[in-house]
Amino acid sequence: MYKEVWNKYKEGFKFLLPFILVQVLFKSTSFNLEFTKYDFFGRGGNLTKNLSLLKEIVINESIPILFYIFIASLFQSFLMVVIKALIDKNHINYKENFKESLGLYLRYLGLSIIIYAMAVGLIVLGFWGILIPFMVILSLLLSVLIIPCDAYLIYYNTSVGEALKKGIALGKKHFGEILLLSITVCIMLAIIGGVMALVNINPKTNSIGYAFINFIASSVGIYLSMFIMTICKKAEKTEEKIIEC
């Protein structure tokens, strides 16, 4: 299925390009979240100090966090609607697609907040030094299981509860495929991050190089979104066959 999605990705790339460029611009602004500058696990597993760090992050990053939750969720729902149209081979009309995404926004936002809450819960779990290995494993498993949830909500125009239930079921069914692709994407992003650190590429020293690398990272991320949306579409065909039987 990877090749099938790649072909659709190439065919629809000109429609996805504006979203990639916006993501590149976003990553180059001060609104981009920079959690890497905080030392989560260098405090010897001291719960009190780590909770204090979490409070510091919430205070210092409040504007970027709110921006990401509310504005980036709208952007992402718009992107997912366009991806859905590309997969279904429908005509792309940004105005109509955006209107459709507005109708899904509140549910998409609610789902995003639930997923963010899960992530925060795992981070808090990792504050106990001895539980860090379990947190890493749980994070990996959970991320694979919940990746299809937002795509399912957009594709089937469902409630948050159904999107979670059916999305996680799809995550279980296609666990191997999603895990393999996710690991590949993570490796690619890690390599990109390593290259950026090695040659000191950042907005201040090399804005063009920084934008180019973020362009690649955003392109890879959108391919992953299209892959997940394709899984949701195939679930529709599977359900139709079951009904016919």
Image (cartoon, rainbow, N blue to C red):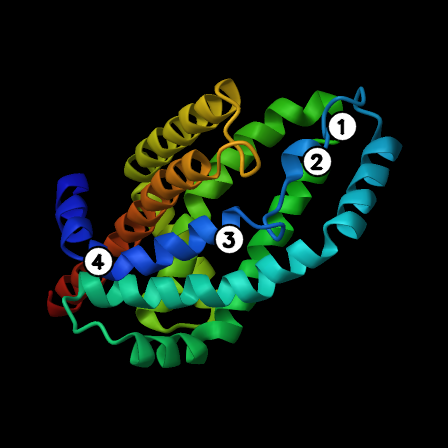
The residue sitting at the right extreme is: 48
Query: Residue 128 got which mark?
Result: 1
SS for callout 2: helix
Return the residue at label 4.
14
Mark 1 or mark 3: which comes first in sequence? 3
Q: Nearer the viewer, residue 114 or 99?
A: 99
Q: Position of residue 73 (x, y in %)?
A: 51, 63
SS for callout 4: helix
Q: Position of residue 83 (x, y in %)?
A: 28, 61
Pointer 3: residues within 10 angstroms few (<14), some, or many (20+)?
some
Q: Nearer the viewer, residue 59 or 17?
A: 17
Q: Nearer the viewer, residue 141 or 201?
A: 201
Cα gap from disc 1 to disc 2, whole angstroms:
6 Å
Query: Residue 125 got which mark?
Result: 2
Could you tell me the amino acid type at mark 4? Lys
Q: Which image quadrant: the N terminus? A: top left
Circle 1/circle 2 CB separation < 8 Å: yes
Mark 2 or mark 3: which comes first in sequence? 3
Residue, x 60% and y 52% (percent of image)? 116
Q: Quadrant of residue 152?
A: bottom left
Q: Quadrant of residue 183?
A: top left
SS for callout 3: helix
Could you tell me the amino acid type at mark 1? Trp
Tell which tag, 2 or 3, sits nearer the viewer: 3
Pointer 1: residues within 10 angstroms few (<14), some, or many (20+)?
some
Mark 4 or mark 3: which comes first in sequence? 4
Could you tell me the amino acid type at mark 3? Phe
Residue, x 47% and y 36% (percent of image)? 141
As displayed, is residue 45 above or below residue 112?
above
Residue, x 48% and y 73% (percent of image)? 105
- State left or right for residue 197 relative to residue 88: right
Residue, x 39% and y 68% (percent of image)? 78
